[in-house]
Amino acid sequence: MSGIIWNVRGFGNLATQRRALFLRRHHHMSFLAVLEPMVDLDCRYMARRMGFEEVVSNKSGKVWFFWDSTIACKVLFDHDQFLHLELSSQLFPSSMVVTVVYAKCTSMEEHSAGVLARPGAMEDFNNFIMLAGQVDAGFVGDRYTWTNNRVWKRLDRVLLSPSWGSLDFTVRVEHLSRAASDHCPLLPEAEGLL
């Protein structure tokens, strides 16, 4: 099972929609998490356009989560900056809790140059990670997930609860190439599922 998590910075753009459709077909995605859609379009319209059965948006409209018929999704908490979801599927041995966050860097090492992030914002995000009991899933691919061609930062990540380590599969996160956005899409894949 795989999906895409992508800060698109505008989902109304046809190039972005074409890229999302290509990624959906190429990676056989079961879900798509879109951050910063920045459109007035109904997210249900975009779900149909992307070929997904269901979608949920957080209350600020900054996080959209699309899924297909292989997944059941229940919203546990809806916040301005994140969606806390419970996902279940016949593909999983048990339900999983997933949080899709619109957030910041966690350390100064995640910057390549330019003005560094406000330490208070990093501290707030690190506190969120700690209180939620999450760990960074790591990644393969480019170190930085965002650029303005002068500064590079790792702004996007997949966080997991430590209990995921006891499951019969692993989660591999790949940073895909940037196209149609200044953020690269993240491809989390569950490897070893039946």
Image: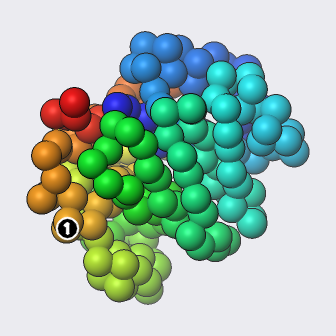
Residue 177, picture quadrant = top left
> Local crowd at mark 1 within 10 Å, few (<14), some, or many (≥20)?
few
Q: Position of residue 179 (x, y in %)?
A: 50, 24
Task: Name the residue rendered at 77%, 41% in the picture.
Answer: 43
Q: Position of residue 181 (x, y in %)?
A: 56, 34
Q: Nearer the viewer, residue 129 or 166?
A: 166
The total of numbered circles placed on residues is 1
Image: 4 above or below 57:
above
Q: Position of residue 180 (x, y in %)?
A: 58, 26
Residue 136, picture quadrant = bottom left
For the C terminus, the quadrant is top left
Task: Name the residue rendered at 51%, 21% in the picture.
Answer: 24
Residue 136 located left or right of residue 117: left
Residue 108 located left or right of residue 185: left
* Camera sees residue 188: no
Q: Nearer the viewer, residue 117 or 30?
A: 30
Q: Amino acid at mark 1?
A: Pro
* Camera sees residue 80: yes
Q: From the image, tell me which residue sits under label 1.
A: 162
Q: Position of residue 160 (x, y in %)?
A: 29, 61
Task: Name the residue rendered at 59%, 18% in the picture.
Answer: 21
Residue 188 located left or right of residue 101: left
